[in-house]
Amino acid sequence: MRIDGMGVVGGFGCGISDLAAGMEEGRSPAEFFPLSTVHGELQVPMLLADTAVLSTMADRRTLRRIDHHTRMALLACLLAMEDAGISEPAAESLGIIVATGYGSTCNTFDIQELCPAADMRSFSPIQFSNSVHNAAGAHIAAVLRSRGPNLSINQFDLSIPMAFLTAAHWLAEGRVDRVLVGGVDDFARIMAYHRHCRFSGRQVGDSSPAAAAVGEGSAFFLVSDHAGSQDGVSVAWAESGFSDAPKIPGFDLCVIGADGFSPGEEAYGRCVSGPAACYTHLYGHLPVGMAFDVAAAVLSLRAERVYASAGGGVPMPGGPELISETRPLESGQIHCLKIGAAGGYGRVLLEKR
């Protein structure tokens, strides 16, 4: 599958230019935000996405009916279409695949906060309708006027490779000419509290790798079946499984999704023997973080350079050595590898033709 365009939004900013700038600068944009809990107000590092620009790209009456989760996904889709130079795709020939780990969980938690004694006038029917798992995909299809297949996929932090696999099958079967495939997850306060409880006991001077901030965002890719094309960046392979992760060839760059949360992240050291990069400091800890790794890999292939890894979530002790300085890319292939929280793995291989 050839990647014709991509769009991203996250704690680093909005658009591939902001992601590229973050990779170039090599710093974490995380900020501390107050989080109200039963134990008082906490200061937790977060990476939040701003979707304000969406009001200039879509009908405002439509935007009033969608929540933050869908806004991020819709914005990433529109940016991907813009990057590909396509304004109105054929209604029947565009497929949409939305991968997510949390789905509408965050919205559901907000609804559940309304106890029977609460003022029911604060209950929103629109908020309730957006708690449906496939609401994001439905809204995207409505805005783009797409009548092609539409699917929401959830396999927590391995949803992205499954989404790419599904897109490849759709294109191979001739169901569609193009697929908008990507992922979205919004900030979960319960995960921010979990991070605080798990990592707040670090001692001053502790040099061990720190976990990434809790993040949110969306990354989408417009892909098409151009097997014979000799230009651009393509998805050459995608896989996911619960066996041992594959060995990455030592001469290829591997972008790893280590964020310090999964107990099995030491497996990165066993799988990756060559150059490795990690950019979780830019987008934070979220289930669909692998989508941002794919976006970072596409930018590296386009620029023919690998950007340094810096700050934020890094591999656990025993992990691969990370690239510390930006340098030319020596191979036309980049592997994106994610070790899942439940022990599985996902891999996406990208190549420049």
Image: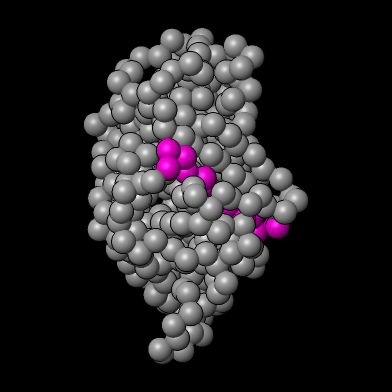
Give the image quarter of residue 322: bottom left
Q: Which residues are magenta?
A: 331-343
Residue lying furthest right: 243
Q: Residue at x 47, y 40 (%)?
A: 333
Q: Up-down: is 305 above or below 170?
A: below
Residue 254 point in image, percent of width and height: 49, 51
Residue 214 point in image, percent of width and height: 46, 62
Taking the image as shown, residue 279 lies to the left or right of residue 168, namely left
Residue lying furthest bottom: 204
Residue 18 shows in the view: yes
Residue 174 point in image, percent of width and height: 60, 11
State yes or no: residue 333 in magenta.
yes
Residue 281 point in image, percent of width and height: 39, 61
Frontmost residue, 233 versus 293: 233
Q: How many marks?
A: 0
Q: Residue at x 34, y 24 (%)?
A: 84
Residue 221 shows in the view: no
Say how the picture is coloured.
Answer: one colour
Taking the image as shown, residue 61 lies to the left or right of residue 160, namely left
Give the image quarter of residue 36: bottom left
